[in-house]
Image: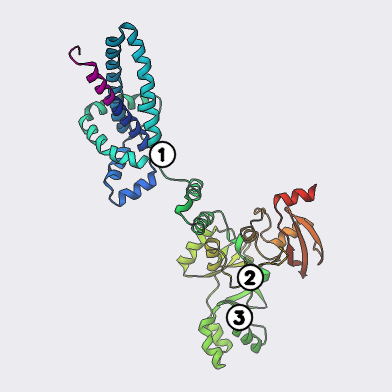
């Protein structure tokens, strides 16, 4: 070492610090890579991504080769700094060189390169993977030996080197990934993806058309009235029953009856021959399962029953799809087929609307663990059948009852109020 000039030693020292920064930044970059984007790049054949993925499959060996290289260059750098300090300042130079080298390594070989790697992991990790892969092959004997010892120590305290490699996301984690996608995924697509995740927590009972609102054909009616109802029906698949929906016979597809209706040749026998048997499902079935059941059974409409087998409502494939993509409404003035904005800022609402639909349409904070419809919420709140003109304060907003029918609320007027407005009223 005495034959090597101080200038040469300084050049070597700078090179060692650069190498230390390489190892530090490589470790941070590889650990900061987005695993799902990495898999995508691997599938596309990106060479750097393929090498990085291969290295990450054995993190113990990756960390082993990085730390082996990093510690080796740091130790050599410390030795050179000691020699340089001693030559320049004698024995005090040993202490001075240690202090200076510590700050140099922290700034130039640790904090700066690691910060850069954390900000741009792919730009650092992919090129570094070529070098690290080669180093791993050259030092494999040493790395495997180090891993043998370290893995043995981990096993002695009950930790397996294979623990923690499961990268499967839970539903809530996947929801967070979708929400954090930002501009990469359009807002409408984010809502659809989140709605798909919600299907598991929503049941048929939450979205079904209540039993008293099911529109069908009663065969006990006069035949001309039946033909008239079929001619003007807004639905394609229509339940056919006698006296009431509990006596359902089956479903008819209006498309197959049109030719008979147009020629005035439709008879009850033709109608009955066209019927398809009713399809019953439990009202507690999750929507994700029911969507698959519709596909499996080749059905598009079903009757929901309770634990006693009593019909509670009707659900169609379209209802489940609306939970994903939103309401299919043909009225441009309506934000929902049951919610109509008014010029004064209020909303006229069909009280039969489900709580879930109302929350989604108006962003109104309503509970979903109780009544399933707005009518149910109002009746639960008032403990009585309200008269038209009655006003009430419902979950932070004023509601006016406009119309009732039989034993239920038919139409209401709602003024959705913000937090500041509510505070003003309360004061």
Pointer 3 residue: 233
Say which residue appears at 64% left-offset and 73% top-offset: 245
Residue 27 x, y percent position in the rendering: 35, 33
Magenta residue check for 2: yes
How many angstroms separate mark 2 from mark 1 (CA)?
47 Å
Asked where in the image residue 212 lies, by quadrant, the reply is bottom right
Is residue 146 visible in the rendered image? The answer is: no
Quarter in which the N terminus is drawn? top left
Pointer 1 residue: 119
Asked where in the image residue 115 lies, by quadrant, the reply is top left
Pointer 2 residue: 333
Q: Secondary structure at mark 1?
A: helix
Say which residue appears at 74% left-offset and 59% top-offset: 378
Q: For the image shown, how many numbered marks are present on the structure?
A: 3
Q: Are marks 2 and 1 in contact (CB under 8 Å)?
A: no
Residue 382 x, y percent position in the rendering: 79, 57
Region in magenta: 1-15
Tell me which numbered mark, 2 or 3, is placed earlier along the sequence.
Answer: 3
Q: Secondary structure at mark 3?
A: loop
Q: Is residue 381 left or right of residue 248?
A: right
Eye-nearest disc, 2 or 3: 2
Q: Which mark is residue 369?
A: none
Eye-nearest disc, 1 or 3: 1
């Amino acid at each position: 070492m005495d034959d090597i000039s101080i200038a040469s030693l300084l050049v070597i020292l700078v090179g060692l610090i650069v190498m230390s920064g390489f190892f530090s930044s490589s470790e941070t970059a590889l650990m900061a890579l987005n695993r799902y984007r990495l898999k995508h790049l691997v599938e596309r054949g990106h060479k750097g991504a393929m090498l990085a993925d291969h290295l990450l499959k054995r993190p113990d060996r990756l960390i082993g080769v990085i730390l082996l290289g990093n510690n080796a260059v740091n130790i050599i750098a410390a030795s050179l700094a000691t020699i340089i300090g001693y030559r320049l300042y004698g024995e005090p130079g040993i202490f001075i060189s240690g202090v200076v080298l510590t700050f140099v390594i922290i700034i130039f070989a640790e904090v700066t390169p690691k910060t850069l790697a954390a900000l741009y992991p792919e730009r650092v990790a992919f090129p570094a993977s070529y070098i690290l892969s080669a180093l791993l092959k050259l030092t494999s004997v040493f790395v495997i030996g180090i891993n043998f010892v370290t893995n043995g120590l981990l096993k002695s305290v009950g930790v397996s080197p294979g623990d923690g490699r499961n990268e499967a996301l839970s539903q809530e984690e996947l929801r967070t990934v979708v929400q954090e996608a930002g501009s990469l995924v359009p807002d409408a697509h984010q809502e659809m993806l989140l709605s798909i995740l919600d299907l598991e927590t929503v049941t048929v009972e939450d979205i079904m058309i209540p039993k008293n609102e099911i529109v069908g054909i009663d065969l006990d009616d006069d035949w001309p009235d039946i033909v008239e109802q079929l001619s003007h029906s807004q639905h394609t698949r229509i339940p056919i029953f006698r006296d009431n929906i509990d006596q359902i016979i089956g479903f008819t597809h209006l498309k197959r009856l049109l030719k008979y209706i147009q020629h005035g040749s439709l008879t009850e026998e033709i109608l009955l021959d066209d019927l398809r048997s009713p399809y019953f499902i439990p009202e507690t079935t999750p929507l994700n399962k029911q969507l698959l059941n519709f596909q499996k059974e080749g059905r598009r409409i079903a009757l929901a029953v309770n634990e006693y087998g009593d019909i509670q409502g009707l659900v169609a494939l379209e209802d489940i799809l609306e939970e994903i993509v939103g309401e299919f409404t043909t009225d441009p003035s309506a934000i929902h087929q049951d919610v109509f904005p008014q010029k004064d800022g209020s909303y006229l609402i069909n009280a039969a609307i489900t709580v879930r639909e109302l929350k989604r349409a108006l962003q109104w904070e309503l509970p979903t663990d109780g009544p399933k419809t707005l009518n149910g919420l109002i009746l639960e709140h008032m403990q009585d059948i309200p008269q038209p003109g009655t006003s009430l304060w419902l979950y932070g907003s004023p509601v006016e009852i406009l119309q009732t029918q039989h034993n239920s609320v038919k139409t209401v007027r709602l003024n959705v109020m913000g937090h500041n407005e509510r505070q003003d009223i309360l004061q």
